[in-house]
Amino acid sequence: MIEIKNIEKSFGESKVLKGISSIFEAGKTNLIIGQSGSGKTVLLKSLLGIHTPENGTISFDGRIYSELEEKEKRDLRTEIGMVFQGGALFDSMTVEENVGFPLKMFTNNSKSEIDDRVNIVLKRVNLINAHSKMPSEISGGMQKRVAIARAIVNNPKYLFCDEPNSGLDPKTAILIDNLIHEITVEYNITTVINTHDMNSVMEIGDKIIFLKEGILAWEGTKKDIFKTDNEAIIDFVYSSNLFKKIRKAQNKEDSH
């Protein structure tokens, strides 16, 4: 579980995060949504320790990050997996080498132990015969699965994903969403996803926080979105006719 309390972050005279508090639970996909400039990327980077908030606390299962010693911070980072927006695979490494990289960097595991773990996670993300391929030789969807495998190879307690569906076609995006959700539940990971993809919200939004101009304007589940009267989230989510129709049909069904 990750708990944030009254997080404030400024750049110069511009306050980007304005007192945000929430809880991200383990075993659930926690989504951060909002328009460009709403503060969602800054919040994600604050959770990762890239940005340091001026006020507030971020705690990982009771450990307040700002109060940890440097060694404790380094230890905590080994419990974190990250899926970057573009995948961020090393072009000069094979799929197998990409996935095994964190184990070589952060553990003292033997080569056979690393190979065994790499095989396990590649199988988990449904990549059986791609070990020796280079990133340029596989599709965008396969690259994202490699990125997910690399992110979970160290058995992380916390998984962060920055726009994991960026650049993918809708069908592949749904497969990646479902894979992240399955892994989250299966390994009881606290997963936080920064996304603008409304299909992701409706597909795997166990917990959603909506930021608007640096303020937490709404939070709830994918089901709550259909019932909320919050104008900010309604305007954001239901800007398309498709979601207006879904909301209307859902409300009609609930009335019976």
Image (spheres, rainbow, N blue to C red):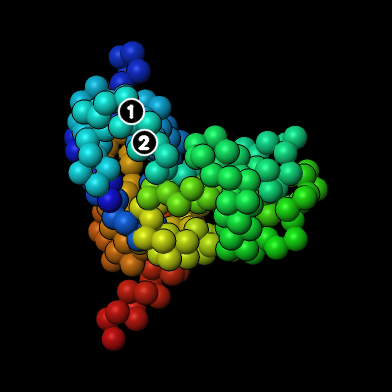
- State whether residue 141 is above or below residue 252: above
The residue drawn where x is 70% and y is 63% is 128
Regarding residue 118, the answer to whether it shows in the image is no
Q: Quadrant of the C terminus?
A: bottom left
Type of amino acid under label 2: Asp
Q: Secondary structure at mark 1?
A: helix
Determine which quarter of the picture holds residue 98: top right
Depth check, front residue: 95 or 180? 95
The residue drawn where x is 51% and y is 39% is 108
Type of amino acid under label 1: Lys
Depth check, front residue: 181 or 95? 95
Q: Quick one: which residue is furthest to the bottom in this view?
A: 256
Which mark identifies residue 131? none
Residue 138 pos. (x, y %) = 76, 51
Which mark identifies residue 71? 1
Compared across the picture, whether 209 is left or right of 22 comes to: right
The residue drawn where x is 68% and y is 48% is 96
Residue 23 pos. (x, y %) = 24, 49
The residue drawn where x is 58% and y is 45% is 110
Residue 74 pos. (x, y %) = 38, 31
Residue 111 pos. (x, y %) = 63, 46
- Mark 2 sits on what residue? 75
